[in-house]
């Protein structure tokens, strides 16, 4: 069955951050630190999905999707990241999964979408190797509770973005600005992914995926400098996270001047066979280089394309380019692919631009010569968009953050009609 779904993440929609024993996450700390998130917005209430999940499941049922990608908040399940399990936190996901199943919607949970328990960050977070093991223990706890109804699991969401924005540049939680010294965060997340994959399978999981943010990298020109810079950026953004998982080896990282703390056996664990690769695609990246700021590459605008309210370039065919590029690079080592996020930020209820965006990207993905098994729109609801707070609206459904009123946008109605015309095996 081809999965047509919507995607969300715990900290971006749930709210209820101190309820039923949930512990603090790095995003609670970060968003409450003045100057970190635009206009001081926090996820304290967000879409209040913790209390309104039944209404949100009904919205999905009305939309006609057959899958829902959501994330589980580690600090709801293990308030200090390890040790005592908080059953009340697990109960929430139990209720959510039941509501989805009752509506014929396949639950696809992601175990880590950036809301690390603060207690683990206090011990070094993903800079430390212990967090990988803790992650696997947490995965086992969740699977023990849900694997009777949940068949498909995603370990990590976008380890690249978490490493770069959270530990490299400090614009996301935990707000560290280590530049390339953040590279061990890649390895510890990937090791956590491998260990969690083993733990999930031991607990009865049938399908395990990782979700990587990928971008087709376009050199700004054919000059040797631009070509070399583009290759370096491609290694950092794409290959650092796909190569070890799919081929069991890291790409050449000498351009970054940092050693990755690999121990014997780690790469075998990381390359644990997968049932699918989750891809989040938003836009291509144009790279020239090197930058005058000491970086081995420089970001350039893509000329002649429209941009979203977030300023992100709209290039639907970039999705086809990306997928065909993955097939060319990995060949038979590429497992079935799921587009686990794709979407755009625009204002307004009559969001014709979003309709054009989704239509264009769905058509582009279908032109790619890969084994595609699913497509999830980011996002069901307008929500807390990380450092941008509530300023970027990605939802098919508008949320009034004063009243929590949900109003389906034109794109919701368009997608409903589109899905009515799809057979479930295309
Ligand atoms: C992705 C994140 C998701 C959302 C979208 C817009 O990088 O995974 O949480 O913020 O971008």
Image (cartoon, helix red, strand yellow):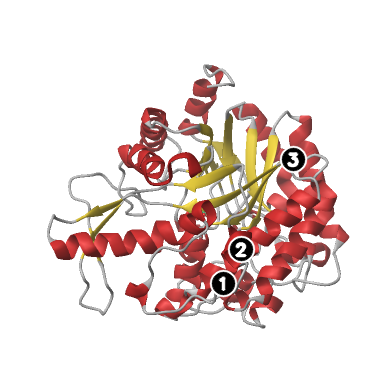
Q: Are marks 1 and 2 in contact (CB under 8 Å)?
A: yes
The answer to whether residue 71 is left or right of residue 426 is right
Please give the label number shown on residue 31: 1
Quarter-of-image position of residue 66: top right
Identify the mark nearer the N-term, 1 or 2. Answer: 1
Q: Are marks 1 and 3 in contact (CB under 8 Å)?
A: no
Query: For the point 57% across and 78% down, which residue is it?
Result: 127
Identify the mark nearer the N-term, 1 or 3. Answer: 1
Query: For the point 24% across and 65% down, which residue is it?
Result: 229
Between the C-alphas of marks 1 and 3, the distance is 27 Å
Q: Quadrant of the N terminus?
A: top right
Between the C-alphas of marks 1 and 2, the distance is 8 Å
Residue tagged by mark 3? 54
The answer to whether residue 56 is left or right of residue 279 is right
Task: Say whether residue 352 is visible.
Answer: yes
In terms of secondary structure, where does tag 1 sit? helix
Residue tagged by mark 2? 43
Question: Which residue ends up furthest to the left in the rendered image?
Answer: 223
């Amino acid at each position: 069955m081809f999965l047509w779904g919507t995607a969300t993440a715990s900290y971006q929609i749930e709210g209820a951050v101190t309820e039923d024993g949930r512990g603090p996450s790095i995003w609670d700390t970060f968003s409450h630190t003045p100057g970190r998130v635009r206009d001081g917005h926090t996820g304290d209430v967000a879409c209040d999905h913790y209390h309104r999940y039944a209404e949100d499941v009904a919205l999905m049922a009305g939309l006609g999707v057959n899958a829902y990608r959501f994330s589980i908040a580690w600090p709801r399940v293990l308030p200090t990241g390890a040790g005592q399990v908080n059953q009340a936190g697990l109960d929430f996901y139990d209720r959510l999964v039941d509501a989805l199943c009752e509506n014929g919607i396949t639950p696809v949970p992601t175990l880590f979408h950036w809301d690390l328990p603060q207690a683990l960050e206090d011990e070094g977070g993903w800079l430390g190797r212990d967090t990988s093991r803790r992650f696997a223990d947490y995965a086992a706890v969740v699977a023990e509770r849900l694997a009777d109804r949940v068949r498909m699991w995603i370990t990590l969401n976008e380890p690249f973005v978490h490493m770069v924005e959270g530990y490299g540049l400090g614009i996301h939680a935990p707000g560290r600005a280590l530049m390339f010294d953040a590279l061990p965060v890649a390895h510890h997340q990937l090791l956590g992914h491998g260990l969690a994959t083993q733990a999930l399978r031991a607990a009865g999981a049938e399908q395990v995926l990782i979700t990587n943010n990928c971008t087709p990298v376009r050199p700004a020109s054919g000059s040797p400098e631009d070509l070399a810079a583009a290759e370096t950026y491609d290694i950092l953004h794409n290959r650092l996270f796909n190569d070890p998982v799919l081929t069991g080896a890291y790409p050449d990282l000498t351009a970054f001047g940092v050693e990755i703390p690999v121990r014997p056996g780690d790469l075998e664990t990381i390359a644990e066979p997968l049932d699918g690769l989750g891809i989040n695609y938003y836009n291509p990246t144009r790279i020239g280089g090197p930058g005058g700021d000491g970086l081995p590459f420089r970001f350039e605008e893509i000329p002649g394309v429209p941009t979203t309210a977030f300023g992100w370039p709209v290039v639907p065919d970039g999705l086809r380019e990306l997928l065909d590029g993955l097939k060319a690079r990995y060949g038979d080592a590429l497992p079935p692919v799921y587009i686990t996020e794709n979407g755009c930020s625009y204002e307004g209820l009559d969001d014709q631009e979003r309709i054009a965006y989704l239509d264009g990207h769905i058509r582009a993905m279908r032109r790619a010569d890969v084994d595609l098994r699913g497509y999830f729109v980011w996002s069901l609801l307008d929500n807390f968009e990380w450092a941008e707070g509530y300023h970027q609206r990605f939802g098919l459904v508008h949320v009034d953050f004063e009243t929590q009123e949900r109003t389906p946008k034109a794109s919701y109605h368009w997608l409903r009609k589109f899905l009515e015309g799809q057979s479930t095996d295309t």
